[in-house]
Amino acid sequence: MSSSIMDRLRAGAVLGAEGYVFELERRGYIKAGPFVPEVVLDFPDALRELHREFLRAGADVMVALTYYAHREKLRDVGREDDLEAMNRQAVRLAREVAREGDALVAGNVCNTWAYDPDDPATKQTVRAMYTEQLGWAAEEGIDFVISETNDYLGEALIALEVIRELGLPAMVTLAPTQPGQTRDGYRYAEACRILAAEGAHVVGLNCDRGPQTMLPLITDIREAVDCAVAVQPVPYRTDPAAPTMETLRSPDGERAFPIALDPFGCTRFEMARFAQQARELGADYVGICCGAGPHHVRAMAEALGREVPASKYSPSMELHPMFRADVAAKDAAFRHSWTV
Ligand SMILES: [Zn+2]
């Protein structure tokens, strides 16, 4: 049963599933805008259920929903007093569901929006936020930590330092929002090399870009590091003209991010193909971020050669009246209404 994240990475691909904030917003449990995971305290059953859906779909890791559950963000929505309870409960819920299967539990921190590379005082602010969040997470019991959507290498290094001080394995990923480098000016592969040299166990990219524009960045990262590489794109059809979900525009020129991205969504088949391509490029931790649904995750798991609990209900289109062996007869009977 449960082995460490490092053991699992050595044994083969680890499948990640994230995007909790987007999905729970869509379901009516998180407010778009602040995107603070109030659902953790207000509707724990809703969060439990989404963890369970990802677990059944084959996710190897239950990521505690502490994304944006940091002091700065909770202050914005007037819930600073709930900070500790929210962080502890998020880990408990992830653990509870992880035990229903054989998943690991990851603590989670993200970019704080408080970091300014030109203002040394902000380093202490960021460090304090990570220290309190991850301190509570470690007390509740986590297997490793994911520090993610980092815009700055400098901020990522602070997270890494805090994780290392807790003696936990660290996965640190960058948000590839810029054409080629972090906001503090490091090429993504170079930033990953530095993170690995400073002791990160897994490095890579997550969020912002869809498969088509994230995959081309992976080869350089794979070549730059010896440690495990993670790649977790958003399931949106970004392309060279609009390389990130933030730059996607509707036909009338409106920004689609963050709550009108639906028309750009990748199918499960596109995400399955992504999972295969990521493995071919040498990625070890293959996952999905904002916009993910359990159907994507299951298709990715199956593309990696697995049968997962939700595979019981994987498609059998030969049983659909429009696709069966006797489809010619069905076509003849229904052709008019199917083709107009
Ligand atoms: Zn994301």
Image (cartoon, rainbow, N blue to C red):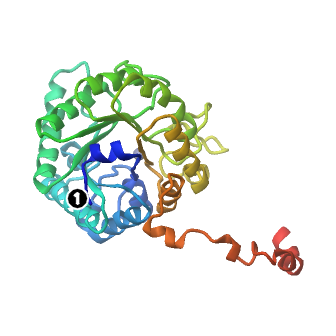
Q: Residue at x 57, y 56 (%)?
A: 268
Image quarter (top left, top right, bottom left or bottom right) of the N terminus: bottom left
Image x and y of residue 26, in percent: 45, 61
Image x and y of residue 282, in percent: 46, 35
Quadrant for residue 132, please give it.
top left
Quarter holding ligand 1: top left
Q: Residue at x 43, y 47 (%)?
A: 287
In the figure, is residue 200 to the left or right of 22?
left
Image x and y of residue 117, in percent: 26, 21
**Which residue is label 1 attached to?**
90
| Relative to 172, residue 41 above or below | below
Q: Residue at x 47, y 69 (%)?
A: 310
Quadrant for residue 316, please give it.
bottom right
Q: Residue at x 31, y 66 (%)?
A: 101
> Which residue type does callout 1 highlight?
Ala
| Relative to 226, residue 148 above or below | below
In this orientation, does residue 125 appear? yes
In the figure, is residue 130 to the left or right of 326?
left
Image x and y of residue 68, in percent: 28, 47
